[in-house]
Image (cartoon, coloured by chain):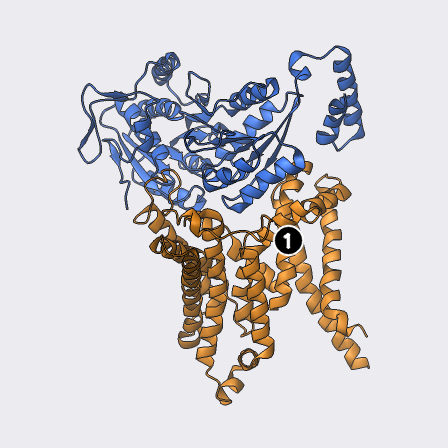
Chain colours: A orange, B blue
């Protein structure tokens, strides 16, 4: 009877439990537990102002979560979102600079495509190495993060540096007319829209198309998929590429909506936080949306926890960690309960 | 009175006793008619740091400045740590203004300025945005933006004199983040000072490529020590790793940003520190009195913006005397570090004989060369 609601009930129960546990931690840290809950609510969801902060924080996380969630359907654990963001941002800035003076729509589309291609090729390479050379995708994607960040630093400190950016080396500015705008009269930039659209499209792709079915087959049993004649290598490459493209797009948004330049601020940890969200959402493209909003809310509320309660910044990491572990654990616990009930019935 | 009563709730929220005591003091002050400062309007200030408050470095220096200042009962200060140079800092500033009622915010990291402060400041014309680092240009930037920074290279010069006296091998080491003008100026000051003591001294520089890169900082420190360096100085966000490594390996170290003497009780010589508590208190006083805040605040020893860490126990009397003498000249304001002839480390004359660049000369703020005696390159 519980079954139809289970996908919602389990994470919600886990969420409630994590708030209780977090309360214990806050109590030990010497702060007033209820007041801290109130601050989290106020900072994340209490007002329209807070909502805007939350949704803005969630924007890049939706896209980077897809970078881990999509390959996960194939059974691959890819953690290269950070590298894809960095390379995507770099490619977007370079394209933006090349297209200065062009029509803004063309410039923005060019930047988005370049970013998706850069991020996509990076993670696509991870998939190819896995399939053709049997290189562990987790390790290679992690190492690609370091390489991407090093490439970015080298280029912005060296050949691509705008000499005017004396103390914070960056590329030249792409120009104010080519910046990405905000949604309506809010302060939420278009990155949030991109994230929503990407999650929806990929959900449809996975649930409603032959391609999605093929991905599930490869993820379920590679040998069976091969025997049925599926082009496994191509599917692995494409899926990884789509994941990388999503994270690359997050890099483009950072450049086009926030910085106007590429610099080391691209390497702000969005890729790593996306991994958490993908796992907490069980790699389901639609579930990524609420999870990213939840984690974005925690990010947004972190400031108030510090300012009102003298709690260190790490407090929000503790909350994230507790939620993450409990959601993952709840899955295992519930699966066991379900099988036990199934066997007695 | 209301505001006086609020205060203990804000800060001493843990015990009712504290709150009662606070009320008592508030009432007492009220009955005395309060001092002039307290009678002035209460000032709410917001501080944003790019790293942890307790990093023994850049961020701790700001946190200490804020903490010293906030002892004044008419100041309320909130702060937030580990805020990256992304849209997160825009949100942090707006949140402090909208939710805490901050009248002035201090986003303390260099990278917060462009585009973040420049984007938010026009939306809140009644709030002052005071940025640490120094880029204010009246022709381009909003009126409610200001910048403050200190000539900390003066204090680094003092460290260089002490290091020059204390080094036996004649080899000093400098671990620096990235080759930007501020960093190069510190390295050059340190080198010029050390070579004013002993002209054969060399300073080996390692750039780690980032402001907070503890693993590389430790590796660089060890590698420099293996090459015979016997005094280490650094310019990274947190000097903790460098100073500790120097101490462990039994060589001398100089500090930066904040006081690191506790980390190296044997080998710590002295260090260059910020004196933000003075700057922040000055700003708060101006705001509460309604004085117009200058858009640009600069200064070195003379203006009280920088200071030297107390000498470590290893420092010789001769070194102290020399350093104190030069500091006194800085205090008078007539010491010129960049007095020609000065060659860079490729042999090119950068400042000809007879030409000098004083502390405030803007030319020094675009420095891209290393002086003679530095072993290292600014590019690649």
Task: Out of B265 and B358, give the one closest to the viewer.
Answer: B358
Task: Out of B98 and B211, give the one closest to the viewer.
Answer: B98
**Does residue A138 sit above or below B16 in this rendering?**
below
Give SS at disc 1.
helix
Residue A87 x/y as whole percent: 41, 58
Residue drawn at point x = 40 percent, y = 41 percent: A168
Residue A90 x/y as whole percent: 40, 55
**Does residue A317 sit above or below B168 in this rendering?**
below
The residue to which callout 1 is attached is A320
- Specify whether B181 is left or right of B274: left
Q: From the image, which quarter does the N terminus of chain A lie in?
A: bottom right
Location of residue A207 by image quarter: bottom right
Q: From the image, which quarter does the C terminus of chain A lie in?
A: bottom right
Residue drawn at point x = 31 percent, y = 28 percent: B364
Question: Which chain does the residue under circle 1 lie in?
Answer: A
- Specify whether A197 is left or right of A96: right
Residue A142 x/y as whole percent: 46, 60
Q: How many marks?
A: 1
Packing grade of label 1 (10 A; few <14, some 14-19, many >=20) is: many
Residue B204 x/y as whole percent: 29, 36
- Specify whether A127 is left or right of A273: left
The answer to whether residue A62 is visible is no
The answer to whether residue A64 is visible is yes
**Does residue A245 sit above or below B350 in this rendering?**
below
- Specify whether B161 is left or right of A299: left
């Amino acid at each position: 009877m519980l079954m139809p609601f289970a996908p919602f009930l389990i994470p919600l129960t886990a969420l409630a439990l994590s708030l209780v546990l977090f309360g214990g931690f806050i109590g030990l840290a010497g702060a007033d537990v209820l007041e801290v809950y109130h601050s989290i609510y106020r900072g994340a969801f209490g007002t329209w102002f807070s909502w805007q902060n939350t949704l803005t924080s969630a924007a890049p996380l939706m896209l980077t979560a897809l970078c881990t969630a999509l390959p996960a359907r194939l059974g691959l654990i890819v953690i290269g979102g950070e590298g894809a963001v960095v390379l995507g941002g770099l490619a977007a800035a370079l394209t933006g600079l090349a297209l200065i003076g062009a029509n803004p729509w063309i410039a923005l589309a060019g930047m988005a495509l370049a970013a998706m291609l850069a991020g996509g090729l990076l993670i696509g390479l991870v998939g190819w190495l896995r399939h053709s050379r049997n290189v562990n995708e987790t390790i290679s994607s992690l190492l690609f993060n370091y390489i991407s960040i090093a490439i970015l630093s080298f280029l912005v400190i060296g050949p691509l540096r705008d000499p005017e950016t004396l103390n914070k080396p960056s590329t030249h500015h792409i120009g104010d007319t080519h910046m990405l705008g905000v949604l309506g009269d809010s302060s939420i930039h278009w990155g949030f829209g991109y994230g929503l659209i990407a999650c929806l499209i990929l959900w449809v792709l996975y649930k409603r198309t032959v391609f999605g079915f093929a991905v599930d087959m490869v993820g379920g049993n590679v040998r069976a998929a091969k025997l049925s004649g599926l082009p496994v290598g191509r599917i692995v490459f494409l899926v990884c590429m789509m994941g990388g493209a999503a994270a690359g797009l997050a890099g483009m948004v950072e450049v086009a909506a926030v910085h106007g330049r590429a610099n080391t601020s691209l390497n702000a940890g969005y890729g790593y936080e996306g991994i958490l969200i993908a796992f907490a959402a069980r790699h389901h493209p639609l579930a990524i949306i609420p999870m990213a909003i939840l984690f974005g809310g925690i990010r947004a509320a972190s400031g108030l926890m510090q300012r009102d309660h003298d709690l260190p910044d790490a407090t929000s990491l503790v909350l994230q960690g507790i939620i993450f572990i409990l959601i993952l654990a709840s899955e295992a616990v519930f699966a066991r309960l379900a099988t036990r009930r199934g066997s007695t019935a | 009175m209301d505001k006086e009563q609020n205060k203990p709730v804000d800060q001493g929220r843990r015990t009712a006793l504290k709150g009662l005591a606070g009320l008592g003091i508030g009432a007492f002050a009220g009955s005395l008619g309060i001092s002039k400062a307290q009678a002035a309007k209460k000032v709410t200030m917001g501080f944003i740091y790019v790293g942890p408050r307790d990093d023994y470095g850049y961020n701790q220096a700001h946190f200490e400045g804020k903490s010293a200042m906030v002892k004044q009962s008419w100041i309320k200060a909130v702060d937030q740590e580990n805020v990256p140079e992304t849209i997160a800092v825009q949100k942090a500033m707006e949140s402090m203004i909208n939710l805490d009622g901050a009248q002035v915010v201090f986003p303390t990291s260099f990278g917060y300025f462009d585009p973040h402060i420049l984007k938010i400041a026009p939306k809140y014309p009644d709030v002052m945005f005071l940025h640490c680092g120094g880029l204010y240009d009246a022709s381009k930037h909003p009126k409610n933006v200001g910048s403050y920074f200190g000539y900390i290279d003066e204090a680094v010069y003092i460290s260089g004199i002490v290091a020059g006296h204390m080094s036996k091998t004649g080899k000093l080491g400098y671990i620096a983040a990235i080759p930007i003008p501020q960093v190069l100026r510190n390295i050059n000051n340190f080198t010029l000072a050390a070579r004013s003591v002993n002209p054969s001294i060399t300073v080996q520089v390692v750039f780690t490529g980032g402001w907070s890169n503890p693993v590389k900082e430790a590796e660089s420190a060890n590698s420099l020590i293996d090459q015979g360096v016997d005094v280490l100085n650094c310019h990274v966000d947190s000097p903790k790793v460098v100073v500790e490594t120097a101490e462990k390996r039994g060589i001398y170290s100089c500090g930066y940003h904040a006081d690191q003497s506790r980390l190296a009780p044997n080998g710590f010589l002295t260090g260059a520190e910020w004196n933000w508590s003075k700057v922040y208190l000055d700003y708060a006083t101006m705001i509460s009195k309604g004085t117009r805040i200058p858009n640009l605040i600069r200064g070195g020893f003379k203006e009280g913006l920088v200071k030297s860490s107390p000498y470590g126990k290893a420092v010789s009397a001769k070194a102290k005397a020399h350093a104190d003498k030069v500091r006194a000249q800085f205090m008078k304001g007539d010491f010129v570090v960049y007095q020609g002839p000065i060659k860079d480390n490729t042999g090119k004359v950068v400042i000809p004989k007879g030409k000098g660049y004083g502390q405030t000369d803007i030319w020094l703020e675009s420095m891209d060369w290393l002086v003679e005696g530095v072993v290292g390159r600014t590019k690649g």
